[in-house]
Image (cartoon, rainbow, N blue to C red):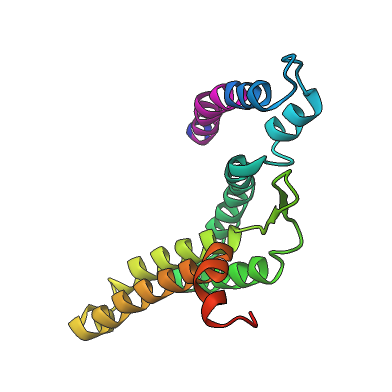
Amino acid sequence: PYQHLRYFINRALRIVPVYIVAVVTIDLMLGDPSFSINWSWIFDNISFIKGWNHLWSVAEEVRFYLLFPGLILFLSFVPGKTTRIVIICICAYFFYSHRNFHKIDMMDGRFVNFYFWVFLGGVGTCFAYKQSLTVAFFNHKFVRFILSVSSILILLFIFFSSNHMIKTFWEPIFPSI
């Protein structure tokens, strides 16, 4: 049990100090020409409440670190691999349907939806793949090919449904989007 705590402490000690230096440096570079520090802006970033521009992803990862261990702990009490996969799929759907509930403020008028559902989709896929290796049906070459192509199509769907791709790729083709 202590190795998990040690993992989180080591991870925080590797990321947080450098992150704080980066946030303070960005504030000094973008802020007031007199080099006064905007403590509110810094607090919003280092508390992971908000994430200025590209720093939103760090705030998102912190949310993963808070939610994922609880889910894994819960799954450790659930018997059966298939039941665990079903629970992960239900959780992924739940977080997908509530992705707008908690948005990360990018502090520039834009907000990023909560992407925990994408992460859970990947976790579910990995669990399902590992489980499928023990089932003879999934060892058939054609079935494995179909699963591989499906995985690629899912990744392409996620990529082409991003806000950036909708604006730059799809909107010129379908202006009503």
Q: Is residue 80 visible?
A: no
Q: Position of residue 83 (x, y in %)?
A: 51, 72
Quadrant location, the C terminus: bottom right
Q: Main secondary structure of the magenta part?
A: helix
Q: Residue at x 65, y 57 (%)?
A: 114
Outermost residue to the left: 141
Q: Position of residue 80 (x, y in %)?
A: 47, 69
Rendering quarter of residue 93: bottom right
Within the magenta stretch, is there residue 90? no
Vertical placement of residue 7 versus 36, above or below:
below
Rendering quarter of residue 88: bottom right
Specify the segment rendered in magenta: 4-20
- Tally the numbered discs: 0
Of 146 and 23, the residue lying toward us? 23
- Asked whether, in this view, residue 85 is left or right of residue 62, the answer is left
Q: Position of residue 138 (x, y in %)?
A: 27, 80
